[in-house]
Structure formats: C-alpha cells, structure tokens
Image (cartoon, grey):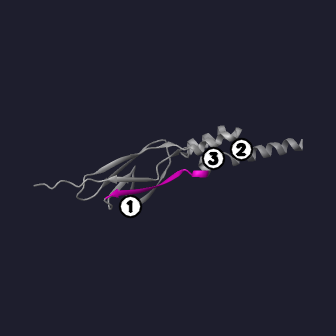
Amino acid sequence: MHSKIISVIVMLSVAILNTGCASMFTGTTSNINVTSTPPGADCNVTGHGVHTPGNVMLGKSYSDLTINCQKEGYEDGSSTIISSFNPTSLVNILTVYGVVIGFIVDFSTGAAWQYANQVNINLIKKANKS
C-alpha cells in the first residue's frame, strides 16, 4: 500500500517537474534587438514602441509580428518577424505526462514558438524634391 502511494507521488512529481519544457527552458517571452540602417528610427513592433537601436520584450505566440519604422528624411520601413516552432517543446516527448500536459502548457503560454532575436530595418533616404 505504501509503495503504491510513493509511486503515485513520484509519478506526479515527475509530471509536474517535466511539464512545459519550452516554458521552463526558453520562457514565454522574447527579447528582440531592433536596429535600423541608419540608426535613430522610431519603430513600433505590434503596439510596442522602440527607438533604434533598442530592445523590445514581447510574449511568444503563433502569430507573426509586424514592425514599422520611421525616421525624418527617410521612407518608412517595415518587416515581418516570423514566428517559428521552438524545438525545445519536443523534449516533452521524453515523458508520458509531458506529451499531454507539457504540450498543453507550452502551446497555451506561447513557449512552443520563437522569434528571431535580431531584426534590422533598412530605411531608404527620400529623394530631394526639386
């Protein structure tokens, strides 16, 4: 009887400790370094402002991010930061409980996804009006 209780406690402990591998190892946010050529642009990354060069901390998600930059004397620039699958989530396969609970945790928190940690926006100088 005691050995069954101990087994259940050990299994639950392992399940709790192994859930959401990507959540535990890589977190649920991304720190993205935003630069522009030339520097000094004001950028907006999906509602979060950043002056280049600078960093913006964003929650991970399945959705791609849009970045728009502006600088006096330059055409506006924009780009998309692609969301991709975070292979760290595959570590959940190593445990029976992790396959179900771990994937649920990683996908619901956004940890199953990742963004590039660097983006550069090239701004084109406006033509002189004559």
Dominant secondary-structure state across the stretch colored magenta: strand
The furthest residue to the left: 130
Callout 1 secondary element? loop
Would you call the spot at circle 1 few (<14 residues within 10 Å), some (14-19), or many (20 or more)? Answer: some
Span colored in magenta: 25-37
**Mark 1 vs 2, N-terminal side:** 2
Q: CA distance from mark 1 to mark 2?
A: 42 Å
Q: Which residue is mark 2?
A: 15
Would you call the spot at circle 2 few (<14 residues within 10 Å), some (14-19), or many (20 or more)? Answer: some
- Residue visible at 39% across and 51% down? 47
Callout 3 secondary element? helix
Residue 71 at what x, y percent from top left?
A: 28, 58
The reply to whether the C-beta atoms of the residues labelled 3 and 1 are less than 8 Å apart is no
The reply to whether the C-beta atoms of the residues labelled 3 and 2 are less than 8 Å apart is no
Quadrant of the image for the N terminus? top right
Q: CA distance from mark 3 to mark 2?
A: 11 Å
Which mark identifies residue 21? 3
Quadrant of the image for the C terminus? bottom left
Does 103 sit left or right of 66 as displayed?
A: right
- Residue visible at 38% across and 61% down? 53
Residue 83 at what x, y percent from top left?
A: 47, 43
